[in-house]
Image (cartoon, grey):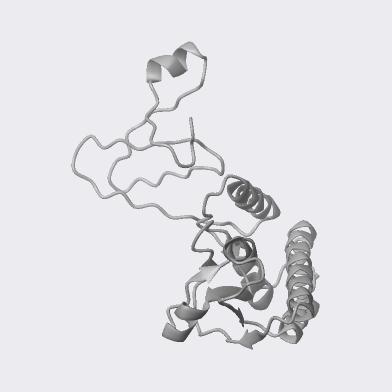
């Protein structure tokens, strides 16, 4: 059974016989149901209704850790992550102050790993003679995903020459782009961030010490 992509509907009798705990309840108008990370769940309508759901992320180390684990698991399963964790982590570093040491360390590590990946890839492309074209990033521009494997693509976007000229920008990750063309022929590499700007964000993101007021 594929919980991520498959079409499934559990048989309650099978679950009971296997001693799998099942909680069933009716959600009344106005009720809010909170489902924790990793919970297998399904919804069945017993009449006319509006089904509204949100992905929420309390600003805690535990929640961030669970989100990163799910993000990495989705990549292994070739499933698109609804939450672009790299994009989110950089926005958190830019816009919030973190006083929890554990949360700070995890976000900082994500930034460091991303910086290393971007710099390594950039150097490899330049060494191979591949031009990197400055593209920048528009305000409120959403995160980008590979059009083939749907992995999140950060900073360096591999787009086909045709889509670049048409400004449709069909994005690929490096792996999928090289599967199409090992030497990246007919691909244009667009850069969305300056390394200096990313390094500045990284350096400015520091742990905030809470002052105790008496």
Q: Answer left or right for 138 relative to 194.
A: left
Residue 87 in view, yes or no = yes
Q: Residue at x 62, y 88 (%)?
A: 134
**Image-quadrant location for residue 7:** top left
Residue 80: image location, x then y, percent: 51, 54
Q: Residue at x 64, y 75 (%)?
A: 156
- The residue lying toward the viewer, choosing from 11 and 20, is 11
- Residue at the extreme top of the image, as rendered: 17
- The residue lying toward the viewer, choosing from 139 and 21, is 139
Residue 34: image location, x then y, percent: 47, 45
Q: Answer left or right for 83 relative to 51.
A: right
- The residue lying toward the viewer, choosing from 11 and 181, is 181
Residue 67: image location, x then y, percent: 62, 52
Q: Answer left or right for 149 relative to 175.
A: left
Residue 109: image location, x then y, percent: 78, 63
Q: Is residue 12 above or below residue 112?
A: above
Q: Answer left or right for 42 relative to 20.
A: left
Residue 140 in view, yes or no = no
Q: Is residue 98 above or below residue 57?
A: below
């Amino acid at each position: 059974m594929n919980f991520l992509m498959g079409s499934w509907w559990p048989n309650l009798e099978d679950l009971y016989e296997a001693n799998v705990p099942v909680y069933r309840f009716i959600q009344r108008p106005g009720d809010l149901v909170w489902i924790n990370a990793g919970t297998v769940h399904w919804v069945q309508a017993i009449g006319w209704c509006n089904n509204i759901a949100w992905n929420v992320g309390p600003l805690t180390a535990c929640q961030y850790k669970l989100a990163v684990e799910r993000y990495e698991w989705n990549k292994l399963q070739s499933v698109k992550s609804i939450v672009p964790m790299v994009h989110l982590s950089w926005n958190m570093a830019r816009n919030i102050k973190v006083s929890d040491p554990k949360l700070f360390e995890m976000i900082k590590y994500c930034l460091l790993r991303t910086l290393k990946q971007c710099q390594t890839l950039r150097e490899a492309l330049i060494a191979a003679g591949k031009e990197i074209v400055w593209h920048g990033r528009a305000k409120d521009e959403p995160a980008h995903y590979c059009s083939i494997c749907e992995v999140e693509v950060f900073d360096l976007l591999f787009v086909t020459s045709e889509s670049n000229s048409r400004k449709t920008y069909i994005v690929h990750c490096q792996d999928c782009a090289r599967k199409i063309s090992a030497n990246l022929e007919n691909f244009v590499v667009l850069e969305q961030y300056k390394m200096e700007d990313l390094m500045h964000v990284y350096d400015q993101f520091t742990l905030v010490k809470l002052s105790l007021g008496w």
